[in-house]
Image: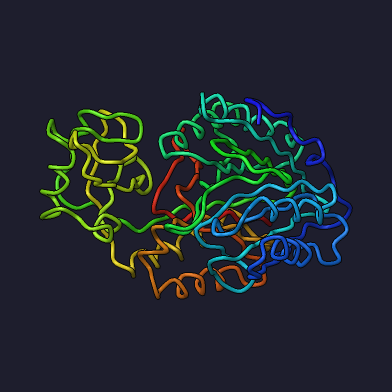
């Protein structure tokens, strides 16, 4: 892929009847067949689809899957990414493909894909520029799908915000794959992209709502990030970050302990921005964590009930943004770390989402990093649930 790709003109258009959303899912082991089954189920007898969103397990061979979905789409814009788990068609699972079709009168779409390897902030700005193509609608949202390390995702969000402005919410997530199985990638038409960002502008005549919750709470005294590098915290309170983090947790943490003790960056309004900590025995005593130097951070903790309560709150916040309008679709970006944390309670979370959705279509994925900006310029999250509601 070149550094910049032209916006997909086929993705800009008006359909002919009221807004609708439809989801298709396949668990077939053959990636081409799975892609074809999911795409056909999503499109069904719909003749005016404007966009296909694809969430496909990273355990699949993605190239034939993407090619088959693009063939079924027959000119309808196709965007998506690999996932650590797929949500839709009655639940969640691994090694599946979920395709969400959106269309009908009152919706407009525009898509752009840009390489983010060299300058992620500029890439976010260029991908986000597609929001201008749907400016004639009353309501807008910019969907961002990314591939690359957490530090790059945060810069992509800042770049997208620089062109979308404060009035356009940002939502999305990072491409993922099941642990120790597969590879991450973005899907843009029938092609695969790495180290890139896809921007999808959605314009609607009806309201759009966003919910962002995680349920974590701060414990203990704050820690000052005294030295940091992109994607790593070198020092906390003037000492090696790993040493300080281990002191707070009472020893060298296991993966499960790290998952239940992220660091939180407090904000003036709303929940903290959560960052996963990877204590990976780095020789310099640093830890993997996307926090900037000068930030005040707290060790966070939560119980399963707190995380599930956050699910209810995120759905309620998203639906509240629709006012009296019924939801057509809930698009869910859930963190892969939450999937591991909830374990056998994952079904409870999905049941809660389905309860809030009612008759609305539900689709989504488990991501590596979530994107949600409704206020301020920051919008990169981890171990968080993001819900987009479309009326």
Q: For the C terminus, which image quadrant?
A: bottom right
Q: Quadrant of residue 236?
A: top left
**Residue 288 horizontal side relative to residue 21, left or right:** left
**Residue 258 horizontal side relative to residue 85, left or right:** left
Q: How is the image coloured?
A: rainbow
Q: Residue at x 83, y 42 (%)?
A: 13
Residue 288 vs 228, above or below: the answer is below
Residue 305 vs 12, above or below: the answer is below
Residue 279 vs 293, above or below: the answer is below
Q: Quadrant of residue 326?
A: bottom right
Q: How many marks?
A: 0
Q: Nearer the viewer, residue 14 or 234?
A: 234
Q: Residue at x 70, y 54 (%)?
A: 64
**Residue 178 horizontal side relative to residue 356, left or right:** left
Residue 229, position as x, y percentages in the image: 30, 29
**Residue 301 horizontal side relative to residue 117, left or right:** left
Q: Nearer the viewer, residue 31 or 186?
A: 31
Q: For the N terminus, which image quadrant?
A: top right
Q: Residue at x 69, y 59 (%)?
A: 100
Residue 248, position as x, y percentages in the image: 13, 50
Residue 231, position as x, y percentages in the image: 35, 35
Q: Residue at x 80, y 39 (%)?
A: 12
Residue 232, position as x, y percentages in the image: 30, 35
């Amino acid at each position: 892929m070149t550094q910049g790709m032209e916006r997909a003109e086929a993705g800009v258009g008006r359909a002919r009847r009221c807004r609708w959303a439809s989801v298709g899912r396949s668990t077939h082991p053959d990636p081409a067949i799975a892609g074809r089954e999911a795409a056909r189920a999503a499109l069904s007898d719909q003749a005016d689809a404007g966009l296909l969103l694809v969430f496909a397990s990273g355990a699949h061979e993605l190239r034939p899957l993407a090619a088959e979905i693009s063939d079924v789409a027959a000119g309808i814009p196709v965007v998506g990414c690999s996932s650590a788990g797929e949500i839709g068609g009655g639940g969640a699972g691994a090694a599946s493909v979920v395709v969400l079709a959106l269309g009908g009168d009152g919706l407009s779409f525009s898509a752009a894909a840009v390489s983010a390897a060299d300058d992620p902030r500029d890439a976010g700005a260029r991908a986000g520029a597609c929001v201008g193509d749907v400016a004639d609608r009353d309501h807008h949202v910019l969907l961002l799908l990314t591939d690359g390390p957490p530090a790059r995702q945060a810069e992509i969000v800042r770049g997208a915000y620089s062109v979308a402005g404060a009035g356009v919410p940002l939502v999305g997530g990072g491409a993922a794959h099941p642990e120790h199985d597969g590879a991450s990638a973005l899907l843009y038409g029938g092609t695969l992209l790495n180290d890139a960002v896809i921007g999808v502008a959605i314009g609607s005549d009806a309201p759009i709502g966003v919910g962002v919750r995680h349920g974590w709470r701060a414990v203990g005294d704050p820690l000052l990030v005294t030295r940091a590098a992109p994607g790593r915290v070198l020092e906390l309170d003037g000492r090696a970050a790993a040493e300080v983090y281990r002191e707070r947790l009472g020893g060298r943490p296991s993966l499960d302990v790290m998952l239940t003790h992220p660091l939180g960056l407090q904000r003036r309004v709303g929940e903290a921005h959560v960052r996963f900590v990877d204590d990976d025995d780095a020789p310099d005593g640093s830890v993997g964590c996307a926090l900037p130097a000068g930030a005040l951070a707290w060790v966070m903790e939560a119980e399963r009930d707190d995380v599930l309560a956050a699910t209810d709150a995120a759905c309620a916040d998203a639906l509240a943004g629709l006012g009296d309008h019924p939801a057509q679709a809930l698009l869910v970006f859930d963190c892969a770390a939450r999937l591991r944390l909830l374990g056998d309670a994952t079904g409870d979370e999905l049941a809660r989402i389905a309860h809030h959705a009612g008759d609305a279509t539900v689709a989504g994925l488990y991501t590596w990093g979530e994107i949600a900006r409704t206020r301020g310029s920051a919008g990169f999250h981890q171990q968080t649930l993001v819900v987009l509601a479309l009326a």
